[in-house]
Image (spheres, grey):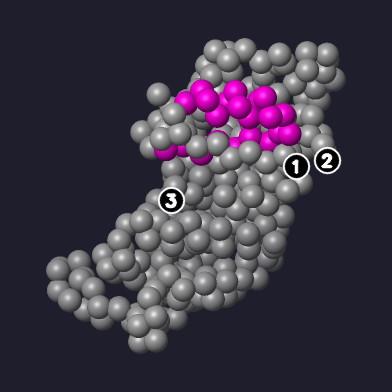
Amino acid sequence: MIGYRKQHFLLLSQDNSLTELVTELWPQAALEWTTIAQGRGAIERIFNDPPDLLLVDRDLPDMDGLEIVRLVKGENVYRQVPVVICLQESSLPDVFSKPSLEFDDFLLRPFKEEEVKRRLELTWQRSTKSLDANPLTKLPGNTSIIQKIQELIDRKDEFALAYVDLDNFKAFNDKYGFSRGDEVLMMTSRVIVNTVRATAGSSGFVGHIGGDDFVFILSPDRIEQACQGVIRNFDSIVPHFYNSEDRRAGCIRSLDRQGNECVFSLMTLSIAVVFNRQGGLQHSGQAAQIAMNLKKKAKQESTSSYVLDRRTYT
């Protein structure tokens, strides 16, 4: 049994026999495989639509599969995706002489069906137990977020922590349904991840607290550029999730939390940014409390907005 919901595994290989082997291990209703033969053609796919597990053949036609491992595990955002690499036994000394590689398991040729199945299942199960990645977006969850913030605070690093909240998301969910709401959350996660990567490369951090709440962490000098990019990209995409009538009206009719019908504007973003300068923050909870107060100010705006906390905490 792979999981409570249908899983999506990605295979990077030009080996047709390997493709046939893995796709027959589980029923398609439980697990769907996508196979890509070229390594370079898969990188953007991995970052834009991260799989539940990545199986990489080292012998790719255009690049060393170990380079794919390095790229995925070098990203703070997606390093939690479990990666299994397929190797020749003769290559083991070379592979294990590279201590910086962080693949989660490996398979040796010639492949044995039962061994492949058990090792892939165990790798996936370990990843789901040891990590709290959000099941929808695959982004680090609340535990990882708190650990990351506290780690930066303990090291007395200077950083900017942005809390992102979708405004009027519940009203959209109520009218258009949870499936459409999940599509909005996936779009939002991709907008944030792509913007942070474009702004800071692999040094940024993005997490999904849960529901419609996200965070991202950057150096203080890059945070405003990232906030502006996230808002600009989100605002350009989100209207397309509404039907043409609601889009023209710029609003929808839905129920509020008390069950009363109200008019809600199209979804916007509120971003609250907390800074840690000169070791001012003492713990992650302090940052969350500051951000909560800032978000109230951002939500007073009728459009997407961000608020920067300029105060100093000692």
139 sits left or right of 96 in the view: left
Q: Nearer the viewer, residue 168 or 295?
A: 168
Amino acid type at circle 2 is: Asp
Q: Nearer the viewer, residue 308 or 181?
A: 181
Q: Position of residue 97 (x, y in %)?
A: 83, 20
Report the residue at 77% width, 25% height from top: 99
Q: Nearer the viewer, residue 74 or 283?
A: 74
The answer to which of marks 2 and 3 sits earlier in the sequence is 2
Label 1, residues with CA under 10 Å away: few <14, some 14-19, many ≥20: some
- Decide if residue 9 is in sight here: yes
Task: Name the residue beneath numbered marker 3.
Answer: 209
The answer to which of marks 2 and 1 sits earlier in the sequence is 1
| CB contact under 8 Å: marks 2 and 1 | yes
258 sits left or right of 167 in the view: left
Task: Name the residue beneath numbered marker 2.
Answer: 62
Q: Position of residue 52 (x, y in %)?
A: 52, 37
Does residue 149 lie above or below 272 as drawn?
A: above
Report the residue at 57% width, 75% height from top: 232
Amino acid type at circle 1 is: Gln
What is the C-alpha distance between the residues marked 3 and 1? Answer: 34 Å
Label 3, residues with CA under 10 Å away: few <14, some 14-19, many ≥20: many
Report the residue at 52% width, 47% height from top: 139
Task: Name the residue beneath numbered marker 1.
Answer: 38
Report the residue at 35% width, 66% height from top: 169
User: Which residues are the magenta region?
Assistant: 6-26
What is the C-alpha distance between the residues marked 2 and 1? Answer: 6 Å
Say which of marks 2 and 3 sits in front. 2
Helix, strand or loop at mark 3? strand
